[in-house]
Amino acid sequence: AQSVTQLDSQVPVFEEAPVELRCNYSSSVSVYLFWYVQYPNQGLQLLLKYLSGSTLVKGINGFEAEFNKSQTSFHLRKPSVHISDTAEYFCAVSKLGASGSRLTFGEGTQLTVNP
Amino acid sequence: GAGVSQTPSNKVTEKGKYVELRCDPISGHTALYWYRQSLGQGPEFLIYFQGTGAADDSGLPNDRFFAVRPEGSVSTLKIQRTERGDSAVYLCASSPLVPGQGFEQYFGPGTRLTVT
């Protein structure tokens, strides 16, 4: 079984500041890793994913994440945030190589960008 | 192109009633998933369809919950004898299961179910 821990439930930052949203996972097998964003009253949108290869993954809206296998982490970063980045962010994992494997989500981190 | 759609967007029902929630996946996507998201929580897996069959229903909380996908496209999540604890946003996702794409799932906007 897999589990995901998002270490911060809420992260307030000022506009144009850098931000890091932390995610750790636990799994007995290798996993794929994902970050999703959820804007108010909307569905989940994929920000980025790690499948294999380079451990630094770039996604949409200027976000990037780094996979660290030894620390079982997949932290999300953005060098300069905008007001429009205010949303709930979810880290998720699924089993590597398993056709149709379910996603296991963390509890989410609410990012609030203040002017 | 059209994304995953879910109807209704909101459903209010009385305790003990039966409800059906519908999901229209992206055309051609063979895999379909249902998740439930309670307030302040991440989505939790309910069931996964590969084509018409339920490949994994281990997330269904009890036998009041049932889902079908008779023609391998549209799916319906059915909840009998609803309880107040069933109140949540029910999310549907679909995936093309293309090798090398990490089985990316595309989510619909969800159905907010409120049981009074």
Image (spheres, coloured by chain):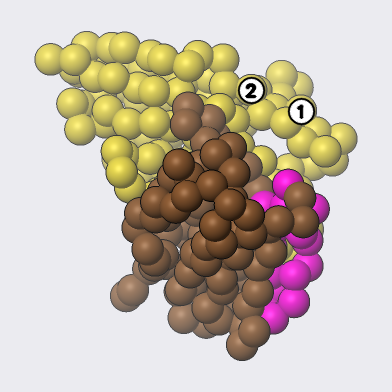
The residue carrying mark 2 is A5
Element type where label 1 sits in the image = strand
**Residue A1 image point, x, y percent:** 83, 38
The residue at 69%/81% (across/down) is B52
Q: Does the magenta stretch include residue B55?
A: yes
| Mark 1 or 2, nearer chain start | 2
C-alpha gap between disc 1 and disc 2? 8 Å
Outermost residue to the bottom: B71
The residue carrying mark 1 is A26
Whether residue B102 is situated above or below residue B38 in the rendered picture: below
Chain rendered brown: B
What mark, if any, has residue A49 been given in the picture? none
**Residue A52 image point, x, y percent:** 66, 47
Chain rendered yellow: A
- The amino acid type, in three-letter code, at marker 2 is Thr
The magenta stretch is B46-61
